[in-house]
Image (cartoon, rainbow, N blue to C red):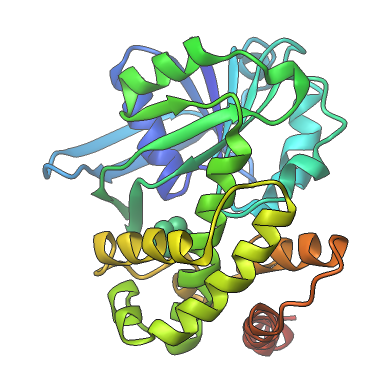
Amino acid sequence: MKITVLGCGALGQLWLIALLRQGHELQGWLRIPQPFCSIDLQDTDGTIYNESIIANDPDFLAQSDLLLVTLKAWQVSDAVTPLAKKLPASSPILLIHNGMGTREELSRVEQPLLMGATTHAARRDGSVITHVANGITHIGPANPQGKDYSDLAEQLHQALPDVAWHDDINASCWKKLAVNCVINPLTALLDCQNGELRHHPDQIDEICQEVAQVMVREGYHTSPESLRYFADQVIDSTAENISSMLQDIRMQRHTEIDYITGYLLRRARAHGLVLPVNNRLYERVKRKESEYERIGT
Ligand code: KPL
């Protein structure tokens, strides 16, 4: 396959290397156009990959069989909209990011749109990307044109296992959203590793109760207890991690709070629900963000 990867950060580089190793033809797409994109990745087994691949070639984009998007949620819509105009109408666009809400922003794209939620963990250490932990990537349709891409899921699985196809991806996205609603704002505000949250069971319970209320209204069969169980599992398996939101706060970058807790609050409002705990967390993260964003402007 010919694949353009939009976003060459930690997750983007992970996919670029995995797909290159499977013999696919790849290009990167960078927000600041450059002729090449360099990959510097250390895999979970310690293997180091250094590659340089072409980037931002519009002809390559016009012939791509897939546009894989690994940007942060808040960057997706502005970056994908112009590229979708040049991508063949039959080539799917796969979005892999934390949070929800980009599907609504891209409701006008012609192409089949697919959503992905992953538990692979990768982080940037200076200029090197470290693949910290293997995981599973759940993908499925985000618009009616994206209905059956289970063959694509199989090809992606060959490159970076595990990949699972879901006819209803929303359920997986909501489950991941619940975990992100717990771990991301709490670690960002407490300035701690994920594992430290084991000492804050009451706050986790309160968040899960509110998330479960919204999920039930959205039509998902869940309970605060099952969300709590899932969140605890992720806290344990990523105990040493610095969550992406805490990394963003430490680097004074824009966070994904509007697509995580913010999305939850928007859906709650649509159902006439009030979520005081998540609302407070949202406000506190926004306040932190605005402190440095104000200084930066
Ligand atoms: O997705 C994550 C993130 O950091 O954004 C979790 C699952 C919380 C792992 O750190």
Give the image quadrant in which the ligand numbered 1 is located: bottom left
Horizontal side, residue 59 vs residue 160: left or right: right
Front one among 235 and 38: 235
Q: Position of residue 3 (x, y in %)?
A: 53, 19
Q: Nearer the viewer, residue 13 or 187?
A: 187
Quadrant containing the C terminus is bottom right
Please give the name of the residue rendered at 35% of the width and 39% of the height, measured from the top-left corner. Answer: 39
Residue drawn at (80%, 35%) of the image: 81
Q: Position of residue 246 (x, y in %)?
A: 46, 75
Q: Position of residue 156 (x, y in %)?
A: 41, 21
Q: Quadrant of residue 236?
A: bottom left
42 on left or right of 192:
left
Q: Is residue 204 above or below residue 48?
A: below
Tell me if I can see residue 125 in this picture.
no
Q: Is residue 157 above or below residue 28?
A: above
Residue 159 placement (x, y as % from top left): 33, 22
Q: How many marks?
A: 0
Which residue is depicted at the point 57% across and 45% down? Answer: 173
Work out whether 255 lies above or below 190: above
Above or below: residue 151 compared with residue 79 = above
| Residue at the image point whose x is 46% and y is 19% from the top | 153
Give the left or right position of residue 195, taking residue 163 as reference. left
Q: Nearer the viewer, residue 206 or 292?
A: 206
- 204 sits left or right of 218 in the view: left
- Answer whether residue 138 is visible to the viewer in this image: yes
